[in-house]
């Protein structure tokens, strides 16, 4: 089911798609978007505790993650990363974005999330047959048709997958979002702290401390995109001890302060019409 805000004068189109029941827990979120008339600039693709899939439906995405030069991507599959991707745009964007649970990497992509850590690649580098589905999505006339094509491909992948992450590692991932300490996570799972660190990095490519930090940062980005909230309020609601603490987190994950981001971001902070 997709909820659509239609394009009218001065209003962008945003679609919040509810994943198929068999994909819930694998696909964390799915969105369609068509943005027109924004000021040209550089949009920051922020780190989060999910894998990101972006399927542009018209022009390639011009993106820089590492190195000084941006390059075009017909599609993007981005792993867990501690740093923002720089997306250069001319004031318009049209496409679909998925957030995948790292635990789903083996089921949907056939590899551990670690193999995608801190990189962004065209989807076809991991799934060579994906281009056919993407071409059909670009020819589709409506959002429901596009999402139906995408979900059919994902369901086929999930049905043919050889296996998933083991139960203890899944439990450790869930605990790392909420536990007070890594020692507490290790004790709950029944591992030593060293074993937890080793197995976590081998599967996900990040330390067990990072999921909670990424979640808090991601909440602050969402809250800061509402210009009616003060940054002090954003910090408290996101779970930081104070605004300077949040600013240090932003400097680490995005190399920008939240105040500066609000001043230069031209896509995320645009006014949007709420859709029930």
Image (cartoon, rainbow, N blue to C red):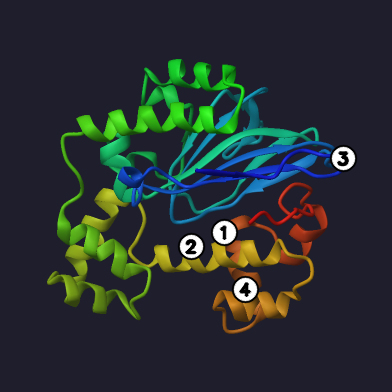
Q: Which mark is residue 246?
A: 4
Query: Which mark lies nearer to you, 2 or 1?
Result: 2
Q: Earlier in the sequence, mark 1 or mark 3?
A: 3
Question: Mark 2 — residue?
Answer: 214
Label 3 packing within 10 angstroms: few (<14), some (14-19), many (20+): few
Residue 10 picture quarter: top right
Q: CA distance from mark 1 to mark 3?
A: 35 Å
From the image, state whether disc 1 or disc 3 is nearer to you. Answer: 3
Left/right placement of residue 158 relative to residue 87 reads left
Q: Are marks 3 and 4 in contact (CB under 8 Å)?
A: no
**Distance in Å between CA atoms under marks 2 and 3:** 36 Å
Q: Earlier in the sequence, mark 1 or mark 4?
A: 4
Q: Nearer the viewer, residue 48 or 14?
A: 14
Q: Secondary structure at mark 4?
A: helix
Front-lying residue, 181 or 157: 157
Q: Disc 3 or disc 4, which is closer to the eye?
A: 3
Residue sticking out furthest to the bottom: 241
What residue did someone put label 1 on?
253
Whichever of labels 2 and 3 marks the residue nearer the N terminus, that label is 3
Q: Residue furthest left?
A: 190
**Mark 3 lies on residue:** 9
Whether pointer 2 and pointer 1 mark residues with C-beta atoms closer than 8 Å, the reply is: yes
The answer to whether one can see residue 257 in this image is no
Quarter of the rendering occupied by the C terminus: bottom right
Compute the Cα span from label 3 to label 4: 36 Å
Q: Earlier in the sequence, mark 4 or mark 2?
A: 2
Query: How far across and down, in percent of the image, does residue 174 sit?
Result: 30, 65
Q: How many marks?
A: 4
Q: CA distance from mark 4 to mark 2?
A: 12 Å
21 relative position to 122: left or right: left
């Amino acid at each position: 089911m997709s909820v659509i805000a239609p394009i009218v004068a001065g209003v962008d189109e945003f679609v919040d798609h509810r994943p198929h029941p068999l994909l819930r827990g694998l696909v964390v979120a799915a969105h369609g978007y068509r943005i027109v008339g924004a000021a040209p600039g550089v949009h920051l693709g922020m780190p989060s505790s999910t894998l990101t899939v972006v399927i542009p439906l018209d022009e390639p995405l011009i993106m820089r993650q590492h190195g000084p030069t941006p390059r075009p991507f017909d599609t993007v599959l981005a792993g867990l990363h501690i740093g923002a991707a720089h997306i250069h745009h001319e004031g318009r964007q049209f496409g679909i974005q998925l957030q995948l649970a790292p635990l789903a990497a083996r089921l949907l992509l056939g590899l551990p999330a670690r193999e995608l850590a801190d990189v962004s690649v065209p989807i076809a580098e991991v799934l060579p047959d994906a281009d056919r589905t993407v071409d059909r999505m670009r020819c589709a006339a409506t959002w429901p048709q596009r999402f139906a094509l995408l979900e059919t491909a994902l369901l086929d992948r999930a049905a043919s997958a050889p296996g998933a992450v083991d139960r203890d590692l899944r439990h450790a991932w869930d605990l790392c979002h909420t536990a007070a300490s890594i020692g507490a996570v290790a004790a709950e799972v029944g591992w030593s702290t060293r074993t937890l660190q080793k197995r976590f990095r081998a599967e996900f490519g990040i330390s067990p401390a990072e999921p909670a930090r990424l979640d808090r940062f991601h909440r602050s980005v969402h809250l800061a995109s509402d210009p009616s909230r003060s940054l002090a309020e954003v910090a408290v609601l996101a779970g930081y001890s104070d605004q300077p603490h949040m600013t240090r987190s932003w400097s680490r994950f995005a190399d920008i302060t939240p105040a500066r981001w609000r001043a230069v971001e031209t896509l995320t902070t645009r006014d949007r019409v709420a859709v029930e």
